[in-house]
Image (tube, grey):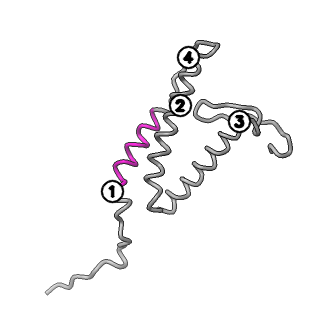
Amino acid sequence: MGILRINFTMSFLGLATNEPFSTTGLVLLILFAAKGILALGLWLEKTWAVRAAKIDAILSAIICIGTMVYIITGPSHSFSFRLELIVLVFYFIKMNNIQHDWENFNGMTTENLPVIEAI
């Protein structure tokens, strides 16, 4: 839509723009693409996905906090708390809790478990 010069509103983590080829628009497009790749990695259970998800959670929190600070110190001097931060904290905690099991999974399923015969 941006190539066709159709303006639309994009907003994510406190960043918003009406022009897809502005600096903010390109940053948002990169964020959307990165989160899409990360979601695909988690869905396909790739070993790198949990580490990337933790990095994503930290970077997303930094962006949220940065936009909150900018709004406070900017021209409007208003305060807005980004609710995404609450979700990001739980997201990071969950990824941190499952990281060891996720990265050390050796492919054992119920079909290839060793069979122990009864005596």
What span is colored magenta in the figure? Answer: 86-99
Asked whether residue 61 is drawn in magenta, I would say no
Tag 4: amino acid: Ile
Q: Neighbour class for label 2 at 10 Å: few (<14), some, many (≥20)?
A: many
Q: Earlier in the sequence, mark 4 or mark 1?
A: 4
Question: Which residue is label 4 attached to?
Answer: 72
Q: Quadrant of the N terminus?
A: top right
Confirm or deny contact between disc 4 and disc 2 (CB under 8 A).
no
Report helix, strand or loop for mark 3.
helix
Question: Which residue is label 1 attached to?
Answer: 100
Tag 1: amino acid: His
Q: Earlier in the sequence, mark 4 or mark 3?
A: 3
Residue at point 53%, 31% (across, down): 64
Instruction: Look at discs 1 and 3 and give the one toward the viewer.
Output: 3
Q: Neighbour class for label 1 at 10 Å: few (<14), some, many (≥20)?
A: few
Q: Earlier in the sequence, mark 2 or mark 1?
A: 2
